[in-house]
Image (cartoon, helix red, strand yellow):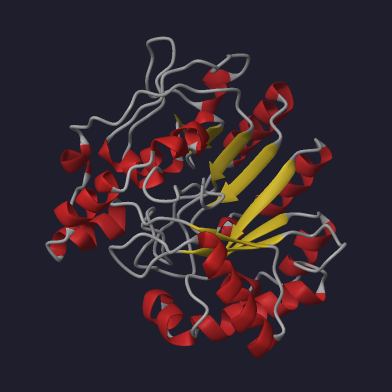
Amino acid sequence: MHATLPLLEVTDFPAIRRRRVETLQVNLGYTCNQSCLHCHVNAGPNRTEQMDRETVETVLAYLAAAKVKTLDLTGGAPELNPLFRELVTRARALEAEVIDRCNLTILEEPGQEGLAEFLAAQRVQVVASLPCYTQELVDRQRGKGVYELSVRGLQRLNALGYGRPDTGLLLNLVYNPQGASLPPPQETLEADYRRVLGESFGIGFNHLFAITNMPIARFGSTLISKGQFNAYMKLLRDSYREETLDAVMCRTLLSVDWQGHVYDCDFNQMLNLPLQHAGKTRLRLADLLGQDLEGNAIVVRQHCFGCTAGQGSSCGGALS
């Protein structure tokens, strides 16, 4: 795989600083039942990295001490970590909102029986990856048969009340472009998803998040192999919109890897660009207990233009 960080080191991205931490985004491991082209963490069935109990306990301690509003669980497939359900249950007991970044096909994996019912019982917000509303494009990006399994997963979640009015069970979908292009306008795309999924399968959901593909890891390596890396970076830079800068997720999000190291965002985590605080680097979450990160300088590189291009992009979709 081609390394992308050397191509991103020199940057003129604006200097930005942190606000209060509102979201703790935790990567529970790289094990996944899928291997997607756009995956920026290189997750897959052959990855074995998983967060251990000591680090999970630190996550819970930080949630309690910092009174963080939201615990955002990602992977890989975060549900494949053996401690996933315990972490969710205990975080909910701390009154934190919990987000599960779910690939939908995990709901039918052996050993995951009752997962959908568990998520509903704990009132976990499900953010489900569905990179398009057509079978051809989903299966091309994620593997043959994934679309059918994803539709069944969405129908199962709908049956439990997810994405339905007045239940409070949030089901949000995630769109990623198929290649080296920016997402189309999020509102227009959301309307298309509602029409096609509703008419074809009776599926409902709350919102669609359109997320720009980052020129790092698996996707970045593919761009290099195809000779498209420089053109894609030019697209991101030329599409920079200053008004998105105030809302970028790294201002209020703290990213934690499976070993407990901390980063300003998930993308920096994958590039091994650690958070810097009080002159120290390679900090772990345990080192930040009782620490105030507000005003802390955020580590930026050239890939940060991916979050400020066009309508902007974050883990919660478009920024403008």
In the image, 287 versus 235, the foreground residue is 235
In the image, 244 versus 102, the foreground residue is 244
Residue 103 visible in the displayed image: no
Q: Would residue 182 be found to the left or right of residue 195 on screen?
A: left
Q: Quadrant of residue 13?
A: top left
In the image, 241 versus 166, the foreground residue is 241
Q: Residue lying furthest left in this view? A: 227
The residue positioned 80% from the left and 62% from the top of the image is: 120
Give the x, y percent position of residue 190: 58, 68
Give the x, y percent position of residue 227: 12, 62
As displayed, is residue 248 above or below residue 128?
above
In the image, 147 versus 185, the foreground residue is 185
Give the x, y percent position of residue 146: 50, 81
The residue positioned 60% from the left and 23% from the top of the image is: 20
Question: On the rendered image, what quadrant is the N terminus found in?
Answer: bottom left
Give the x, y percent position of residue 309: 36, 47
Q: Quadrant of residue 274?
A: top left
Q: Residue lying furthest bottom in this view? A: 200
The residue positioned 39% from the left and 68% from the top of the image is: 36
As displayed, is residue 147 above or below residue 2?
below
